[in-house]
Amino acid sequence: MQLAISVHERARRIRRASLRMVHQARMGHPGGDLSCADILAVLYFHVLQLDPDSPRDPNRDRFVLSKGHASAALYATLAERGFFPHRDLDAYMQPLSQLNGHPDRNKVPGVEANTGPLGHGLPIAVGMATAAKLDGAPWRTFVLTGDGELQEGSNWEAIMAASQLRLDNLTVIVDRNRLQQGDTTEKTVGLEPLAERWQAFGWSVVEVDGHDVDALVAVLGDLPASAGRPTCVIARTNKGRGVSFIEDRVEWHHRVPTDEELAAALVELEGEE
Amino acid sequence: MKEAPKGADCRVAFAETLIALAETDRRIVAVVNDSLGSSNLKEFKRRFPDRLVNVGIAEQNLVGVSAGLASAGKIPFACGASCFLTGRALEQVKADLAYSRHNVKLCGMSSGMAYGELGPTHHSIEDLAWTRVIAGLTVIVPADPIETARAVRAAAAMDGPVFLRLSRMPVPTVTPEGLPFEIGKAALLRAGRDVTIIAAGVTVGRAMTAAELLSSDGIDAAVMNLSTIRPIDRDAIVEAASKGPIVTVEEHTVHGGLGSAVAEVVVTTHPVRMRFVGVPGVFAPTGSPEFLLDHFGITPEAIRSAARELVEH
C-alpha cells in the first residue's frame, strides 16, 4: 500500500532527525522520541486535518504532545509536514532558539500547548474538545501521552471529566513503551490493567501495535471508537524503536549518542531516498 | 473599636457583571470545580446552562481545561476557592495560563481568611505571594462591589491571564462613583501629607477608618487602594514614598504579598521607612474572619499605631 510506505518513510526521517538533534544539542530524550515516531507520522500525514500555511486556522484538528520531552520528534515532524524549514531543526536547544527543550506554542508554528510538566496535556485537550462541542464545530482533538506520565493524578481528573462531558471528539494515544526514566512502569508504580482502567472511567479503548503504520491508520481513521465516548488508543511501543542498541533500554531515556553511536544509528535507519 | 460585620459581599457584583458580559459576548464561559454556590454562579448556570462547565472537584483539571477552552477562543472565568485554585493548581497556573499566555480569568473566591473557623487549610493568605511572582500574570484584588464589577469588566476586556482575588467578607463601599478603573493604576482614595496607607481588598475600608482616627491625632494620612498587585503602579508608590513613610495593610501573610511588592519598589527608588500590617507569618487560630483580622491587628487601631510610630519617631 503506497500510503503506508510513505508514512513509514516519514517516520524514519523523523527518527533520523530526532537523533541528529539530540546529538547536536548534547541533550534530549531519544528513547521517547523514537517510540512515538510512527504515531506522529500517522497523525501528521494521514489523520490530522490541518494546513501548515495556516497554523492557527480555527477549524484545524488539534494535537497536543503531552509528553513534551519528546520535543525533538515533534519538531522533526512539524518540519517534515512543512510548518517550518528542516534547517531550523539545527537550532534545537541552542541559546535563544525558538526550539526549546519543551515546546512553546507562542514560538513554534504548529505547537498547540506548552507541555513539559507531565499530566498537563490531557486537561488542556479536554478544554479544547469542550470548546469544539460548545461551538458545534467538527474539528477534533488528539493527545499523545507517555505511559509513565499516567502516574500523574491530573490525568485521571481529566479522564473522568472527559467521559462525563461525552467528548467523543477527543482521542488519547498512550505511548505504551513500558519504560519511564528510572525503570519499567510496572516496577515503579504499575499501570496494568491499563485498558480496563480507562474502560472503567467510561472510555472506549482500542489496543494497537504502535509501530504498525497500517494498523494505526486503521484505528485512527475510524474515530470515535464508539459514539458518545472519548477514545483511548493504547499504542504498544518500544522505547528507542528502530535502533538496536537503544531499543528497550532504560538508560536511553535521556542519554545522548556519541558520534560513533549516531553514525551507527543512522545506518540502521537508512531511508528509501 | 471592632468593625461591624456589615457591608456587601463582592460575589454578588461578580456574578451580576459576569452574566451581563456573557449576554453580549458568547466567548465567555464559566468553569467551576463544583463551586457553583460558593462562586455564586447558580443564576449564570440558569441563564447559560451550556456555558457553565463543571469539571468536578479537580483544580488541576479546572485550570488545564480552562487553558484549552481559551486556546480555542473562549474567555473562561475559572472559579474556585482561592486556597485550592492557587495552591493546588499553581503549576497549571504557571505553565498552562501564564507561560502559555492563555486568556483565562482565574477567580479565587473567598480568599484571605474569609473561611474563618474552617481554618488554615481553607485560608488563602499565601495566594498573592504565589501568583504575583509569575511572569505575565495580572493580579487584581478588588476592594468593594463597585471595583469588583469594574475589575471583572477590565479583566474580560484584556487579552491575557488574570488572577482576580475575590472575597466573601462583607465590605463597605470605598470606591467613589466617578473614579475610573484601570488595570495597573492605583487609586488615591484620600490625600494626605504625613504618611501613606497602602491597602487592597477587604483591608481598604479599615485603612480609611484608620485615616479618620489619625486625623483626630493631627496626622494627615493618605490612603491608596493598590488593587492591581501586578503589574504594580510604580509611579504611584514612588510619589507616596517621596512624601513620607508608608504603612501597608493586607489580609495575607506579610511575607511576599502586597507589602513586599510595595517594598520592592520603595527600596529601589525612594527608600522610606515602612510598616507591614498583615498576618505575621503564622497559621491562624480558630475564629471568625472578623475575629482573625482583629487577632492579627489588621484593624484601624493597629494601622493607626503603625502610622503614628512612623510619623512620630
Image (cartoon, rainbow, N blue to C red):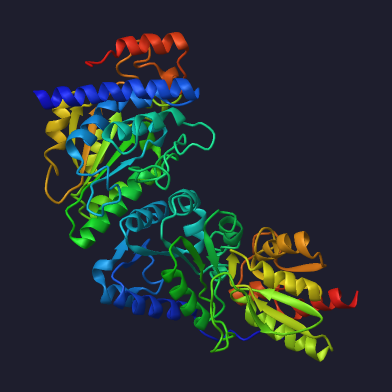
Which residue is more in the foreground, B53 or B236? B236
Q: Is residue B81 above or below residue A85?
A: below
Q: Residue at x 35, y 76 (%)?
A: B21
Q: Residue at x 44, y 23 (%)?
A: A22
Q: Is residue B59 above or below residue A263?
A: below
Q: Is residue A76 above or below residue B189?
A: above
Query: How many numbered dots are placed on residues in this image?
Result: 0
Side of B45 where B155 appears, left or right: right
User: Residue A46, position in %: x, y?
Assistant: 17, 35
Q: Residue at x 57, y 88 (%)?
A: B176
Q: Quadrant of residue B156?
A: bottom left
Extreme right residue here?
B313
Q: Quadrant of the C terminus of chain A?
A: top left
Which residue is more in the foreground, A224 or B125? A224
User: Residue A185, position in %: x, y?
Assistant: 37, 27
| Residue B67 visible in the snapshot | yes
Which residue is more in the foreground, A119 or A33? A33
Q: Quadrant of residue B254?
A: bottom right
| Residue B296 visible in the snapshot | no
